[in-house]
Image (spheres, helix red, strand yellow):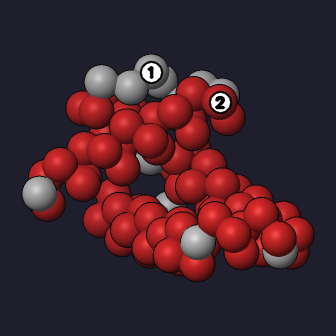
């Protein structure tokens, strides 16, 4: 079963909230807590990449990002989508 764009964007919003958590904890904790860096950082990046690879081409193109033909461009596209969604809410 494929997920719709609305579901993927909801996942994106949730992942963006999750990405904000380590930031809220502060740089000192990030620098001193290895597990925080390894587990939280990698989990958020992996989740964003997973969502990015599932976005339909029309969503990627609407952001001005490159196509989602590889993991690198998919994550780049996700950053563009995060910016587009953030700007829309501003």
Q: Is residue 47 above or below residue 87?
A: below
Q: For the residue carrying disc 2, how many other residues have a C-alpha within 10 Å: few (<14), some (14-19), or many (20+)?
A: some
Secondary structure type for disc 1: loop
- Residue 21 located left or right of residue 62: right
Figure check: 65 above or below 37: above
Residue 78: horizontal and vertical position, in percent? 46, 43
**Residue shown at 57%/39% (left/top)?**
75
User: Sequence order check: which comes first, mark 2 or mark 1?
Assistant: 1
In the depicted structure, whether residue 49 falls above or below residue 75: below
**Residue at image point 44% right, 73% down:** 17
Q: Mark 1 points at which residue?
A: 66
- Residue 44 found in image quarter: bottom right
Residue plotted at (47% across, 24% down): 67
SS at badge 2: helix
Residue 32's mark? none
Residue 7 place in picture, x, y as percent = 37, 69
In the displayed structure image, the side of residue 86 where residue 14 appears, left or right: right
Position of the N terminus, as image quadrant, is bottom right
Disc 2 versus disc 1: distance between alpha carbons? 10 Å
| Residue bearing the label numbered 2 | 72
Quadrant of the drawing holding the C terminus: bottom left
């Amino acid at each position: 079963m494929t997920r719709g764009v609305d579901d993927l964007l909801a996942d994106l919003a949730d992942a963006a909230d999750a990405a904000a958590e380590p930031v809220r904890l502060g740089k000192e904790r990030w620098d001193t807590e290895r597990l925080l860096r390894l587990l939280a950082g990698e989990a958020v990046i992996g989740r964003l990449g997973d969502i990015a690879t599932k976005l339909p081409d029309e969503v990627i193109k609407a952001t001005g990002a490159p196509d989602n033909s590889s993991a690198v461009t998919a994550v780049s596209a996700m950053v563009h989508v995060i910016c587009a969604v953030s700007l829309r809410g501003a």
